[in-house]
Amino acid sequence: MSKEIHPTLIGIAGGTGSGKSTFTNRLKNAFGDQVAVLYHDNYYRAHDELPFEERKKLNYDHPDAFETDLFLKHLEKLKRGESIDCPTYDFSRHNRASATLHIEPRPVILLEGILILYEKKIRDLLDIKIYVDADADERILRRIMRDTQERGRDIENIISQYLNTVKPMHYIFVEPTKSYADIVTNSGKNQVAFDLVRGKIARLLDEQTGESETI
């Protein structure tokens, strides 16, 4: 008789531009359909009541910027084997988009975001906690490249946001969560760290499926 499979939950945190997405995508590619990804960024709060110029000035690096209660609700549904329709976010408009993203439960669920390890309720659900670290100069350069090429931002807005909220919030809220991590890697491309996590996931999956094969 087969046993119910409980998802392996992996949190991947780190500062903006640290390489979280690179590490996340490598794991997703390694395990294919066994993996679902939940991006904390998609759970930024909607601010339809504010004009665009006011939304640009909001602090998006503070824990209160996220609708974490909804994030937790969706995570618990995935753990129960239920699908979700998670929100999406339009970074060019600094606001939640109308479209949703349908996500089916999978044996492995990756949770990615700068503050994934900040909220204790999220940490307590995680099987593996990862912090992707990087030099501050590298992170801001990657952020500039990403935000200009992928998010329709101008350099002036990126620099202003970085100096006023991103940088101070990183040192107050993001970097301290490094102490909660099981693994700290200096790059999303670090092969040793990737091999360790990939091997751990593979063993957890084998344990789940292998228990039903005992005589």
Image (tube, rainbow, N blue to C red):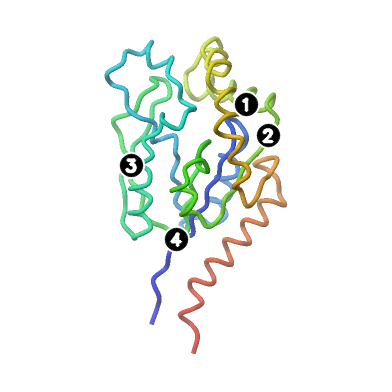
Pointers 4 and 2 in contact (CB under 8 A)? no
Of the numbered discs 2 and 3, the one sitting upstream in the chain is: 3
Residue 56 horizontal/vertical position (percent): 42, 15
- Say which residue label 4 marks: 7
- Mark 1 and mark 4: Cα distance apart in space: 32 Å
- Mark 4 and mark 2: Cα distance apart in space: 29 Å
- Mark 2 and mark 3: Cα distance apart in space: 29 Å
- Mark 1 and mark 2: Cα distance apart in space: 11 Å
What residue lies at 44% left-to-right and 38% top-to-bottom?
40
Of the numbered discs 3 and 4, the one sitting upstream in the chain is: 4
Which-is-in-front pick, marks 3 and 1? 3
Q: Is residue 102 above or below residue 9?
A: above
Q: Nearer the viewer, residue 199 or 113?
A: 113
- Say which residue label 3 marks: 70
Element carrying mark 3: helix
- Say which residue label 1 marks: 142
- Residue type for callout 2: Ala
The N terminus sits in image quarter: bottom left
Element carrying mark 2: loop
Residue 115 horizontal/vertical position (percent): 51, 37
- Residue type for callout 4: Pro
Pointers 3 and 4 in contact (CB under 8 A)? no
Q: Nearer the viewer, residue 150 or 132?
A: 132
Which-is-in-front pick, marks 1 and 2? 2
Of the numbered discs 1 and 2, the one sitting upstream in the chain is: 2
What residue lies at 61% left-to-right and 61% top-to-bottom?
200
- Residue type for callout 1: Arg
Of the numbered discs 3 and 1, the one sitting upstream in the chain is: 3
What residue lies at 68% left-to-right and 26% top-to-bottom?
136
- Say which residue label 2 marks: 134
